Image: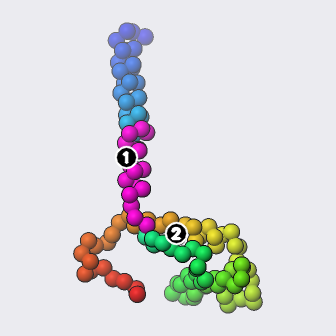
Amino acid sequence: MKARTTVILLGLFIILLVFVYLFEGPLSQQARQKAQGIPLLFPGFPRNAAAKIAVKSTAKEISLEKQADAWLISGTDGFLADTQAVENALDTIAGFKRESIASKNPKSRTSSR
């Protein structure tokens, strides 16, 4: 290889290293800090107080009801739901963040309450 080609390739390599450093270092930390500043969708969600989870579609509704320490699938003959999966779902719901608002005008926001 010629010396000129080697210098050009070395320069390109250094430029790539700078980009990798910027996007993996300070810039990615700013993105993480910005994401941490987003408020929770359900602040103070009482995960342990949840007694029923309902999933509705146009065709039917399936719900899970907590009885004692077990989650039962309603509409069945006492089938038990996977407790670990339900706990994971509740943890996920508790961690939801409000990332985007459909409208900044409070009058145009609708509530299901």
Q: Residue at x 71, y 73 (%)?
A: 82
Q: Residue at x 69, y 73 (%)?
A: 83
Helix or strand or loop: what does disc 2 sit on? Answer: helix
Residue 5's x, y, as percent? 37, 15
Q: Residue at x 33, y 69 (%)?
A: 101
Residue that label 1 marks: 30
The residue carrying pointer 2 sits among few (fewer than 14), some (14 to 19) or many (20 or more) residues within 10 Å by Cα, namely some
Task: Name the residue nearer the viewer: 48 or 79.
Answer: 48
Vertical placement of residue 104 versus 74, above or below? above
Q: Was residue 37 drawn as part of the magenta stretch in this picture?
A: yes
Vertical placement of residue 106 versus 99, above or below? below
The N terminus sits in image quarter? top left
Residue 79's x, y, as percent? 74, 83
Residue 22 is left or right of residue 62, and the answer is: left
Evaluate whether residue 105 shows in this view: yes
The C terminus sits in image quarter? bottom left
Q: How is the image coloured?
A: rainbow
Vertical placement of residue 69 versus 93, above or below? below
User: From which residue to which does the magenta span run?
Assistant: 24-40
Q: Examine the image and state in which quarter residue 105 appears.
A: bottom left
Residue that label 2 marks: 94
N-terminal label among 1 and 2: 1
Residue 71 is left or right of residue 94, and the answer is: right
* Amino acid carrying mark 2 in the image: Ala
Evaluate whether residue 72 shows in this view: no
Q: Was residue 77 drawn as part of the magenta stretch in this picture?
A: no
Helix or strand or loop: what does disc 1 sit on? Answer: helix
Residue 86 is left or right of residue 10, and the answer is: right
Q: Residue at x 61, y 83 (%)?
A: 51
Task: Tell me which secondary structure the magenta stretch mostly adopts.
Answer: helix
* Amino acid carrying mark 1 in the image: Gln
CA–CA distance between discs 1 and 2?
24 Å
